[in-house]
Image (cartoon, rainbow, N blue to C red):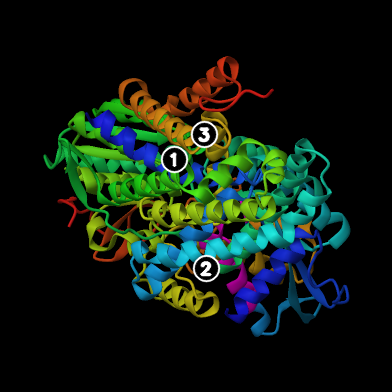
Amino acid sequence: MDILVSGLLLAGTYALVAIGLNLQYGVARIMNLANGEMLVLGALAAFWLYTTTQVSPLLTIFLVGPVAFVGNWLIYRFLLTPLVRRSKNQGMLEVDSILATFGMSFFLVGVMVSLEGGFFAYKYLSEPIVILGSITGLNRFVAFLLAVLIGGALYLWLNHSRSGAAVRAVAVNTEAAGLVGINVPGVSALAFAIGGAVTSVGGALISTFITLDASIGVIFTMKALIIVIMGGVGDIRGAIVAAIILGLVETTVATLIDPGLTLVAAYLIFLLVLLLRPQGLFGKSAT
Amino acid sequence: MKRRNILKLAAAAALAGGLSLGNAAFAGDTVKIGAVAPKTGPLAGGSTVTHWPNIELWVKQVNERGGLKVDGTQKKIELIEYDDKTNPGEHIKAVQRLATQDKVDFMIAPYGTGFHIAAAPIYAKYGYPMISVTAITDQIGELSSRYPTMFFTLGSTTSFVEGVRDILVDMHKAGTIGNKVAMVNVADAFGIELADVARKLFPAAGLEIVYDKSYPLGTPDLSPVMKGAKASGPDAFIAWSYPPDTFGLTEQAIIENLQVKVFYTAVASSFPAYGGAFGSKINNTLGAGGSNPSDPKIAAWRDAHKAATGLDADYWASANTYVSLQILEQAIEGIGKTDSAAVTEYIKTHTFDTIMGDISFDQQNSAKYWTVGQWQDGVFHGVKGSNVDGAVAVRVKDGWN
């Protein structure tokens, strides 16, 4: 039971890390290597507001979300749209966007280091609660609930609304979506902005129980990449299922075998998925 | 944004572009000192607490009093900083650049054990005295005989583990605790080396290691580790940990309400941010490092540190870092020239008056350092050390309130 609870809570953390990148890569076709930095920016905002004015991180997310939405929309419109326009095919856009966002990640790290070079050390809701007989941190549980909420809301929006259908259409086939009258640049910008907002909100939540610093973003980018590739690009369900698998497997290995082997286990699963289902668990095979 | 931050931003931007700052000053008017350490990357969180602020403070203080006394006059320090991005390759390149292009007179030692070992050959090649602080290793003898310009000031791996062992053994003999120790370590050179030494020293002293696991650096969820340690029913919990996991393990111990009489975490336990994050809950937890904050010299330095940098100094290597700069300063002024070979020789043969008292080197190693400290009512006091004064009695950990 300990394994199930801890594993699911860890999965919630992973989902927060990966859902945003999934939208950005799946819909806007931007492989955003600055994803982790976006997350750390959210964490930095939560840390600052909490330590200077005692604003609860749970309120901070309502500030971080919209600001990150606007910020990411602007990034897409002004920094990434030129790349989208000039790329002749998706492969070229991926290469260009990887290079551009890689550079952006350094810029963001530099900005954050200048604001706060040390650890974002604070604790919020660091209280024990008992779930199904297993002790865990309240902050982790809250982050899990919000991950469920965000994931659920995105799923409903994508699958049961007209604008969501447009986003899915762009994810499936950019050109065809344009042919049926969908405003592809607009939808892509929207998806990129929502992705950035989800990631920074995730960062604010994660910072309540993991001590981050300005340079740690790359670790989260790597985890997000694994989850997105495992789950299948452009499918929210895939990212969530992959996060759950990763969370449960890592916790099981840490509890029953050895905590030292969690990374090995994570990469082993990743390899298996790549070997057996290269398009990802929920991905559509390339035609 | 404060002015300091803007300056830092400008510095970061200049560094990113591979430019060096302050080249405008004429050579000869200043003493050029180079510093290479992480400003970004995994070790940046620690270096911005322990390493960089003390360099900033020291340069400011020396320049405010007119500069270093060399060549029969006073010359201000011109500091040239590079970010090694926590990458040994970058570090070595930056050192080469400092030596060959910026032509600095002296260099400040790196931050982090691995960097000292990786970069020692290049510092030695250019003949700069390298007064190491954040280098904890059992290879001190070997390294100092191989690199005649390298000095150590923070103790060895074994002395570190011995500090912890002595506390456990004393408490066990006094009947305060049983002999069961749960031990975890971060799977990184630092943690692995300390755990290896502890696996030999603890059982030899009659302690039983009932839980012994490692976890990868950057593990997002340490609750399985803490649950496992708790289930082993230990009297003491020892973690050879790095900053993020020091915070993570402490939080999990609070959540799991781990009832041990000794709780020890390694790096970052001495950071003011650690005390700030957990407040009274971590009263009587032990950690790597230590200091004697009631010593007037240390207290004055802490005040100056806060005033100059806006940051509280950590209760461990911050002081040693400042001491290493004081040693460099006194050696340069003792020689009165920017002659690195003569300064190195001076360091080997003289005693230095520092904020930690008199320091001298035996075989390039200073035996004055703290090994274990304890948070007692909001201040991290040294409880074990080598040749240091002001150690306070160890208290028993009693719950997490």
Q: Residue furthest front?
A: A180
Give the position of the N terminus of chain A as an image quadrant: top left
Query: In the picture, residue B203 is in which quadrant?
Result: top left
Q: In the figure, residue B198 lies in which quadrant? A: top left
Tell me, yes or no, if residue B112 can be seen here.
Answer: no
Amino acid type of disc 3? Ile
From mark 2 to mark 3, how far is it between C-alphas?
A: 53 Å
Residue behind mark 3: A227
Residue A46 shown left or right of residue B74 in the figure: left
A123 is within the stretch colored magenta: no
Horizontally, residue B61 falls left or right of residue A151, namely right
Q: Which residue is mark 1?
A: A14
> Of tags 1 and 2, which is closer to the observer?
1
- Residue A276's x, y, as percent? 56, 15
Q: Is residue B46 magenta?
A: yes
Vertical side of A90 occupied by B22: above or below: below
Q: Residue at x 61, y 48 (%)?
A: B364
- Determine whether the residue tagged by mark 2 lies in a helix, strand or loop: strand
Q: Nearer the viewer, residue B291 or A246?
A: A246
Question: Which quarter of the image is occupied by the C terminus of chain A?
Answer: top right
> Residue flagged by tag 1: what amino acid is it?
Tyr
Magenta residues?
B40-61
Callout 2: chain = B
Q: Position of residue B182 (x, y in %)?
A: 27, 33
Residue that carries the numbered disc 2 in the rendered image: B354
Label 2: how many residues lie within 10 Å, few (<14), some (14-19) or many (20+)?
some
* Crowd band around label 3 with a 10 angstrom C-alpha radius: few (<14), some (14–19), many (20+): many
Give the residue at x 48% y 50%.
Answer: B367
Q: CA distance from mark 1 to mark 2?
A: 49 Å
